[in-house]
Amino acid sequence: MTNKTGNKKALASEETEELLRLLKGRFEKNMNRHEDLKWANIHPKLNDQPEKLWSLNEMEITGGEPDVVAYDEKKDEYTFFDCSAESPKGRRSVCYDRKALESRKKFKPEHSAVDMATSMGVELLTEEHYRALQKLGEFDMKTSSWVQTPDDIRTLGGALFCDRRFGHVFVYHNGAESYYAARGFRSSLTV
């Protein structure tokens, strides 16, 4: 949905209220992810940025279960990550980026991770973000997630993905055009 000016993505007021209730409930249920933070400080920032609420809703409806994981005091910004136990179900079976998608001659996936993230107004987690997420719990025990890939690797046709197995976080490489039913991507959003 677009707002009245037609140039920003925004939710209807009922959708906004429902999303805020859901986010608050998840925030309060998972205080280990943000021990020193208060919802009362986050809520107004979300209300002031309808396009960010729209992106959080996109994270939610694709199965990401977004939650606050960090606060930058200098910038007065909160960071949300997808905190679903496994790579978000609505974002799996995607190759890495548009170039990879266009390079496939047969059996193309419907989307690429980078294009989906861009259309949602979010970013793929970096390897550093992924490792920070894994300090908050155990994620991707059965799935894996594409992460931002350095240009020198991507130029050679590769892309990076991560998962958690055997009590450790692993970073792997694959051809960027590959896609699997158990591989998706996790995203971040700063508010």
Image (cartoon, grey):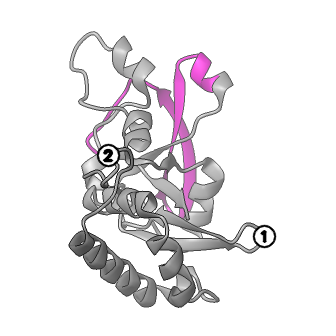
- The answer to which image quadrant residue 34 occupies is bottom right
Q: CA distance from mark 1 to mark 2?
A: 33 Å
**Which amino acid does the dot numbered 1 rest on?**
Lys
Residue 17's x, y, as percent? 29, 78
Percent position of residue 169, x then y: 56, 57
Tag 2, which secondary structure?
Answer: loop
Report the residue at 38% width, 78% height from top.
Answer: 23
What's the mark number on residue 6? 2
* SS assignment at label 1: loop
Q: Is residue 142 visible?
A: no
- Return the residue found at the far top: 105
Count of numbered tags = 2
Q: In which quadrant of the rendered view does residue 177 lie?
A: top left
* Magenta region: 153-182
- Dot 1, crowdedness within 10 Å: few (<14), some or many (≥20)? few
Residue 55 position by quadrant: bottom left
Q: Which residue is mark 1?
A: 74
List x then y, in percent, for residue 42: 53, 80
